[in-house]
Image: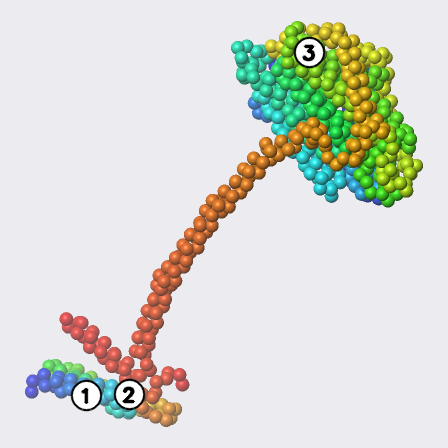
Amino acid sequence: MEYSELLQPLPWTPPTILCLVILALPFVSFLLMATTPNGSRKPMSWIASGMILFAACLSLYLLLSTWASPANHTRFEWFTIAGMPKVTAGILLDINTALMLVVVNVISFLVHAYSTAYMKDDEGYKKYFAFLGLFTFSMLGIIMADNLLIIFIFWELVGLSSYLLISHWYQKDSASKAAKKAFIVNRVGDAGFLIGLAILWVQFNTLDIEALKVLMQQSMLAEGQWASSLGHVLNADWLTIAGIALFLGAMGKSAQFPLQIWLPDAMEGPTPVSALIHAATMVAAGVFLMARIFVLLDIHALTFIATIGAITAFMGAVAALTQHDIKKVLAYSTISQLGYMLMGIGVGAYDAALFHLFTHAFFKACLFLAAGSVIYALHEFEHDTGLKFDAQDMRNMGGLRKKLPFTFLAYGVSSLALIGIPFFSGFLSKDALLSGAYAWADVMSGGGFSFYYLVPGLGFLTVVLTALYMFRQLLLVFFGDFRVISKHSDHSLNEVKEVPFVMKSALIILGIMSLGLVWSINPLDHSHSWFLGALKAPAILTPGFDIDWQPRLIELMFSNHIEVTLISITMIIIGALTGWYLYRPGSPYAKSYFDRKDTINKFQALSYNNWYLNEAYKLIIEKPLLWISNGLTSFEKRVIDRAIDSLAIGNVILAHLIGWIDRMVVDGFVNFSVFFAGRIGVMTKSLQGGKIQSYILIAVFGIVLMIFWIIW
Amino acid sequence: MAIEHYFILSAILFCIGMTVIITKKNAIVVLMGVELILNAANINFIAVSQLDNIKLGGQFFALFVIVVAAAEAAVGLAIILKIYKYFSTTNLDEINQLKG
């Protein structure tokens, strides 16, 4: 097929124009918040929230109106490069996009509304809302774009707004450091993304996703060579490398091993930002990107993705076990759940991965906002009573369910969803994911035992750990005694007040979305979910891909479903019981936990320090880098600077020499001519002494001379 | 008498006149030196006149020179008189300024 046919412009249709409106609304909100004076910040923030609400309503309408219809695609010519097919841009609205639009806009609206209360006394109120608008705009851009290049542009914009929001309290050293860390670690992933784009461009000369799908299907693999239908040939390895390179981008944004170190630090940002960006939407962008290019991945890239996903899920869950900070636990849990999603993509459970993305977006946003409520309430308490304590440290909390019933309810519901208890949303999506992983291991190992079983194995292990750390957190925060007042007995729990209504209402809406019934008529079986009914994994188009692979996966997924459900429920019970046993109010272990300063064994230290990844980076990257740059510094000082110095000294010496020549030779010559002229002057002057007789004598002498001259 | 003797006399007279002009301090004496030189020239004229008996150009010229010398002496003495009035001296060594 010719490029002109593949990349022909497609007209604007009402749904895609509506998409454009949805994209423009948050940007207008950003401009509005950025340009209006500080005095009107409160009403302006409500207008901004209203605009996002409007966008949310529009995207809900868009979802309902395009529910069963085929994808809407609008494309126009962007620019051309001589000798290349034209570069296009446009909007691709399929079911994924419509669903993601709803998720982003709804959560963004709830976070906007929640923030009007949470951030009400903050100095950077205006800046905060402006950047929220910028973030929402860039996130929507990633979702809508039909072209990997445009996705990459918005991808970077999302990284920028994440950086700006993490460093919201930039006066705090830790916050600005965390922002820099997030930005730099993301750059590593983005470099991979760019390499992936370069490979696709070299092979196919376009980055339009729909065109790439057609071209990928037409390309051929033979004798270790990967040939595109237009005759460009690359080594077959590049097909795998392209997939892995694009996944690297997702690894950065979605905090996958080994690039997950930035996410826990990103919790330095305000809590609603953590809910929106670092739990629900931006970190899911990597999963969304992988879903967009799912059909372009080959089996090796998929296996790589599944492995990394499973490792990350397990590592995140382990690290979440021993954190003291209420937000850190949730951050590690997010890493773990993102690992699940990418494992889902890797094992071919495309629909389950997206399903988990959506359910996770709601219940994790709910958890973060509820954690924000707890922190808010404790801050107010701290402010009212004048006590000094860390409002995010769970060792200071306890017993809050009596005074924060709404928050407790929302926290409880979303925790149960995260753990994966039946009747909650997480159960459905997580079961779908684990069934997919289990089926994948069966298909890949072809009946016998193989290392492929490690992937679902790590998945199941993570279920135990998830139940354990969430029960631990619930028990530490909401049950037992309020440990701050047990230290300062002159205050009582009654002084803790429930949060304002706006914050509560956001929690209620997100809490409802965490219930299983919202997502499926039969909350015990994910296969009845309306969501999974609408999403079907597209057939993988990569050349050389086994066409039986996907049907076999689906078949096995259905047959092992009951088995997987039973295993995971058993796992949950094990984890929950362990959690209850260790951290129940009054247990000796919990008591010792509150008092001890340090971790008690190596395993705890490993978990608390997130597998010593930061230290490993310090050792492997930072130290050699510092060593090299120190070496270069001293090389510069000793060699280059010295060379320049000696050059300068040589110059000075030369200058002195030239100065001497100037003085002695050139000036001497000039002085000599002056001296000579002076002498001549003196000599001739003496002839004209004003003595008339000497004139006559000279005249006579001259005449005599002339006479002699004539005679001779 | 051979013509050479006149020339020698004339040369001696010229030399004396020249010497007077160059060596004497007094301006009037210098003028006297000039008269001697003029007369040396006159002797030459008259001496060579014997070679030309018809026209007598030499003698004529000598008379002419005497007339001019008389005029010259009058003008020269007038100038010296003026100089003496201005500088109160006729010593040529002291009169060395052109500016009046």
Q: Is residue B25 above or below residue A295?
A: below
Question: Is A617 in front, or is A683?
Answer: A617
Res B46 visible: no
The amino acid type, in three-letter code, at marker 2 is Glu
- Give neighbour class at mark 3: few <14, some 14-19, many 20+ (Cα, 10 Å): many
- Residue name at image x 81 percent, y 40 percent: A389
- A322 to the left or right of B68: right
Alpha carbon of mark 1 to alpha carbon of mark 3: how far?
147 Å
The residue positioned 57% from the left and 18% from the top of the image is A238
Between the residue at mark 2 and the residue at mark 1, the CA separation in whole angstroms equals 20 Å
In front of the other: A199 or A428: A428
Label 2 marks a residue whose chain is B
| Of residues A696 and A402, the one drawn nearer to the viewer in this rendering | A402
Left or right: B65 with respect to A197? left
Place of residue A162 in the rendered image (x, y in percent of width and height, measured from the top left): 72, 33
For the residue labelled by badge 1, is the local secondary structure a helix, a strand or a loop?
A: helix
Judge the density around disc 1: few (<14), some (14-19), many (≥20) Cα neighbours within 10 Å: some
Which chain is mark 3 on? A
The type of colouring in the image is rainbow
**Quarter the N terminus of chain A occupies:** top right
Marks 2/1 same chain? yes
Residue A440 image label: 3
Tell me how far mark 3 sits from mark 2, CA to CA. 146 Å
Residue drawn at (87%, 33%) of the image:
A481
Residue at mark 2: B72
Quadrant, the C terminus of chain A: bottom left
> Which residue, given by chain and number where applicable, does mark 1 sit on?
B16
Which residue shows up at 67% across the image and 35% down it? A181
Chain where mark 1 sits? B
